[in-house]
Amino acid sequence: LNSRKYEPTDVDVAYPKCDLRRSGEPFVQLAKPHIGGHDCVVITSGPGTYEMLGKLWLLLATLKGRRARRISVLCGYYPLSRSDKDEGKLELALVRIITDITIAASYGKLDRIIAVDLHSDQVVNAGPPGVITQVSTVRRLLYRAVEEARDEDARLVLCYPDDSAGKRAEPAVEATEKQFGIQLPSVFGSKRRYSSTEQELKGLYGDLDKLPGSTVLMIDDEIASGGTAQASADALIKVHDVAQVRGAMTHAVLTPKAFPLLEAEDCSLSRVYVADTIPLENREVVQPLLHSGRLVEVSWKDDAGWIVYHHHWDESIREER
């Protein structure tokens, strides 16, 4: 890991053992030389299952007990980030309490939670000021999509589910346009969200005259069941006569409903670019989609290294790479 201002910095990578005793009670094994007096960054992801959250909280307590100098969490996919508002009458939003417990698990030693492409900007406010920092991999996904579209001589139009998604992606789009020397037309949807699992895209506005015959790239923070993305792609093809629809969707949540939809020959999504913020290599069910090219994995490992290094030296983790 290099910087313009510092010599290469040694990094000790430790793999804690998190397991269950015969009684079913959990334990964590991690030796003090990895921790005592050091700047410790826990790299984790999601979705936020009981097991994943329990391991994270026990590990944070272990780092505190082993006298870490500073503790931070780099989270590829923020746990329960889709629960940013109440789900009707029965279900309260829990993202705030997840954040509070994460902070409490380190006994006040947690310096920062760095999260990738949050579902909602308001998740940043689920913790005390400055604790949650959002970073983005959209530029990396967008670069790959633009590069492949140029190789295929395809005319690309960007499509956002709503105006806020467009604003979040704006820095990445501007940087990509500058890098390729192009201008990317955009259309924006009017999305109605009923719950964390139900939403509908109603109408489009923007550069609608650029849609016929184009390759549309739908940009969003995640793909879960794929139902909304598929319905939107169908509408783009049937109503606006686009040539094909692709997706650039950071987090590959991919619930069981997504696989028959994406594997179907008549799927309206011809290609979906995803980051490995939720690891794909250990998910057997995902491998056929990767091999077929329907799902394209874009690694965020270089971004993670950049973030860890610059966070350690108290430099901006968002400056130009």
Image: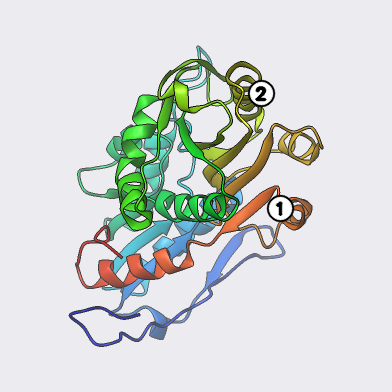
| Label 2 crowd (10 A; few <14 / some 14-19 / many >=20) | some
Q: Relative to the observer, which residue lies in front, 103 or 256?
A: 256
**What residue do we see at 30% from left, 78% from top?**
38
Q: Relative to the observer, which residue lies in front, 115 or 36?
A: 115
Any part of residue 291 in sight: yes
- In the image, what residue type sits under mark 1? Gly
**Dividing the picture into quarters, in which one does residue 127 lie?**
top left
**What residue do we see at 33% from left, 38% from top?**
168
Please tell me the numbered disc located at residue 293: 1
Is residue 108 depicted above or below 94 in this figure?
below
Q: Relative to the observer, which residue lies in front, 130 or 152?
A: 152
First in residue order: circle 1 vs circle 2:
2
Q: Relative to the observer, which residue lies in front, 51 or 264?
A: 264
Q: Which residue is mark 2?
A: 234
Left or right? Give the position of 163 relative to 274. Answer: left
Q: CA distance from mark 1 to mark 2?
A: 20 Å
Name the element at disc 1.
loop
**Dividing the picture into quarters, in which one does residue 86 lie?**
top left
Left or right? Give the position of 121 relative to 215. Answer: left
| Label 1 crowd (10 A; few <14 / some 14-19 / many >=20) | some
Name the element at disc 2.
helix
- For the C terminus, the image quarter is bottom left
Residue 223: image location, x then y, percent: 59, 38
Left or right? Give the position of 105 relative to 16. Answer: left
Any part of residue 76 in sight: no
- In the image, what residue type sits under mark 2? Asp
Is residue 4 depicted above or below 111 in this figure?
below
- For the N terminus, the image quarter is bottom left
Is residue 97 depicted above or below 235 in this figure?
below
